[in-house]
Image (cartoon, rainbow, N blue to C red):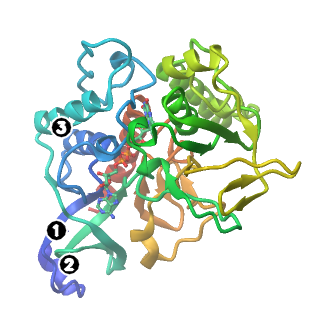
Amino acid sequence: MAAETLASEGLGGVTGTARVVVVGGGQAGLAAGYHLRRAGLDFVILDAQAEPGGAWTHGWDSLRLFSPARHSSLPGWPMPPYQGPGYPTAGHVVDYLAAYEKRYELPILRSETVTAVSRAGTGLRVSTDTGTWAAEAVISATGTWWRPFLPLMPGGFTGRRLHTVDYRSPKEFAGQDVVVVGGGNSGAQIAADLVGVANLTWVTRRPPRYLPDDIDGKALFDVATRRRQAIETGRPDTAGVAGLGDIVAVPPVRETRDAGLLDPRPMFARLDSDGPAWTDGSGCRADAIIWCTGFRPALGHLAPLRLRTTHGRIPTAGTRVVAEPRLHLLGYGDWTGPASATLIGVGMTARAAVADIKATLDIGG
Ligand code: FAD
């Protein structure tokens, strides 16, 4: 669609036009860019961060992939092998993502926060903190890291209250009483990180469910793909990765667990001023509570579209939003494609999203 057409449809003040605008330049946005380039579509990627790497630039110091480099690749170019011991570090992932966007000369505008996506004529208007883009289709790939979830908990706890996103290293908690809440990957990894440095209490809503020790990212992707195939062919839902467990037993988690140092308590009932209290009358002191209670999709910029959600998710057919077919969601979780929130999984989902967009735009002319 030509810029003049957009202007005649009332899109005055447009600072740029692109057939497809991708919101978010993390791994999902880059995978979308790779396939948009191959499809020959005119596009731009708008990313809020000043630097490449998406959420991988923000994790804690010891954060590592749960799979080797060869099973953590975006489409087209495999992640280079990691030379150090163990699985690749978050820094290695950031270097890979930075090199990836250069290699494919992806058109990324940085420090560009999308504040709103709205309908405008036959297209979509993408408003940022510096201007406005007109697009025929939008791929939203903003991830979840930017929307940490903390449950409401009554009580007047006076110590430090942190979320996964605030945690960097065990050093700042040396010798302190620290409660880690959460039985997922972040909770288990941060609890393992604190063992031997802080006086740790790990609290989980239900007993931790570890995936088999030999499971890595590749196996998780295969399980997620089998689930999608089962659903698509009318066979019983296998429950996918969730059916296997919640926690990937990465080496530090496995080692501390096997040494008997990761022994969780059930969820507490309330918070007193000095720490949590359980229904059996027991309690523990805490200097800090780290809530590893997950994330929600960062979809605030889509509010003007007034899309209904079911259990916090916008209904989609594949990646296409049912109520707004010009909008695709990529990378938020299994609901937008098998393992689409992972490095190995997002490529296949991005390819399907771009094929769908191309077919729709080709029909529209
Ligand atoms: P992000 O990396 O969050 O990128 C989104 C980008 O969008 C960011 O650059 C952000 O600045 C930008 N953005 C957000 N809002 C806006 C806006 N309004 N306007 C413009 N830009 C915006 N996956 C694996 O494959 N292997 C692993 O080992 C693994 N370990 C993980 C460990 C943890 C603790 C977590 C939380 C996740 C892990 N994942 C792993 C999952 C996944 O790889 C990451 O969550 C990944 O960062 C998701 O990529 P993304 O591109 O969807 O989102």
Q: Is residue 225 above or below residue 1?
A: above
Q: Residue 306: x, y in percent?
A: 51, 77
Q: Quadrant of the N terminus?
A: bottom left
Tell me which residue sits at (27%, 16%) in the image: 82
Q: How many marks?
A: 3
Assess whether mark 3 and mark 2 are in contact (beta carbons under 8 angstroms): no
Q: Which residue is labeled 3 in the image?
A: 98
Looking at the image, which is closer to me, 77 or 201?
A: 201
Q: Nearer the viewer, mark 1 or mark 2?
A: 1
Figure quadrant of residue 114:
bottom left
Sequence-first disc among 3 and 1:
1
Q: Is residue 198 left or right of residue 210?
A: left
Q: Which residue is labeled 2 in the image?
A: 6
Sequence-first disc among 2 and 3:
2
Q: Residue 209: x, y in percent?
A: 70, 29
Q: Quadrant of ligand 1?
A: top left
Q: Residue 173: x, y in percent?
A: 46, 41
Sequence-first disc among 1 and 2:
2
Looking at the image, which is closer to me, 182 or 311?
A: 182
| Amino acid type shown at disc 2 | Leu
Figure quadrant of residue 345:
top left
Q: CA distance from mark 2 to mark 3?
A: 33 Å
Element at label 2: helix
Q: Residue 277: x, y in percent?
A: 77, 53
Q: Is residue 114 above or below residue 269?
A: below
Q: Is residue 148 left or right of residue 56?
A: right
Q: Which residue is labeled 1 in the image?
A: 17
| Amino acid type shown at disc 3 | Ala
Assess whether mark 2 and mark 1 are in contact (beta carbons under 8 angstroms): yes
Q: CA distance from mark 3 to mark 1?
A: 25 Å
| Amino acid type shown at disc 1 | Thr
Element at label 1: strand
